[in-house]
Image: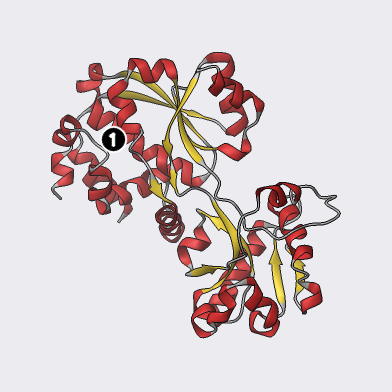
Amino acid sequence: MKRHLLGAVLALAVPSLAVAQDCGKVTIGEMNWASAQIGVAVSKFLLEQGYGCEVEVVLSDTTPAVTSLAENNEPDIVPELWRNSVGEVYDKLKQGGKIAELTQTLDPGGVEGWWIPTYLAEAHPELKTIEGVLANPELVGGMFNNCPDGWGCRIVSDNLARAFDLEGHGIKVFDHGSGETLAASIASAYTDKKPWFGYYWAPTTPLGKYDMTSIDLGPYDKAAHEANQNPGNPDPKPSAFPIAPVLTVVTTDFRDSHPVVSEFLANVSFKTDKMSALLAWQDENKATAEETAVYFLQNNTETWGAWLNDDARAKLSKLLDK
């Protein structure tokens, strides 16, 4: 089936070399996680077949990508850059006019929170708030599934567990040893429709596979959240998790020399829950990023068709008409 999907799209594609002079060679950074790889595969196809670009994918990660932008003014395009993971070098690049932020690659961004299965929320609506959870510890199984050791979210969740006094309300904090066991705990709960309560984030495969409800932790408090990132915080305070900006960044040289392509890239944004669903499809079908991109292209023509200008839409009209 995957080969059929891939062949169907490629058969409709315009040979990129025939139209490469429209755009020329561009470089795009690909982060080393699945959602970024899917997004790059989608963008690469549309850049080549819709805009005539010759796309070179540069394998990277957050810090190396920002370092390369600072030292080499490349790659031209860096999608899915998590803004909260970059520091002063990025700030200097932006303030110095070396880079431009075109759009949010993920809409509304990276999502973190404490969750329960939706079947549990539907059976017990009071559990949709942290106050309801604290008042009914038995309904969530009396346990909080915490972040694994060594993860940044572990520090914040540890502090929030103290701020909300989970243990004092009869909720044991279980520290997972790995991301695999944390994900497996959700799958296991869903299999038997048992209670589950814990930390997770999106876009991820589990939140694409399993219908989960985010617990209302109250308002976001910037000062409290920043303090909760300190493992030595003596007096943690409650705060919701902020949404993390996830950006598509280009060099200003590229933006200025490729205004049409930059306009297209400014439109390329995936709903966070949609990306989670794509990750779940990829996992279930043991698909590559390219095969998952094909699946997205075939089943979301209205979404990506709206990203294109008229010329690119005409080049891809056969695929859009499928």
Amino acid type assigned to the residue bearing label 1 in the image: Leu
Q: Position of residue 95 (x, y in %)?
A: 56, 21
Q: Quadrant of residue 218?
A: bottom right
For the N terminus, the image quarter is: bottom left
- Which residue is rendered at x = 47% and y = 41% of the image? 36
Q: Position of residue 211 (x, y in %)?
A: 47, 70
Viewer-closest of 56 and 186: 186
Q: Is residue 134 left or right of residue 308?
A: right
Q: Position of residue 228 (x, y in %)?
A: 75, 52
Q: Which residue is mark 1?
A: 46
- Which residue is rendered at x = 71% and y = 46% of the image? 226
**171 is higher (above) or lower (below) than 270:** below
Please give the count of numbered marks on the rendered protein: 1
Q: Quadrant of residue 279?
A: bottom left
Q: Position of residue 128 (x, y in %)?
A: 56, 74
- Which residue is rendered at x = 52% and y = 78% of the image? 121
**137 is higher (above) or lower (below) than 68:** below
- Which residue is rendered at x = 52% and y = 55% of the image? 202
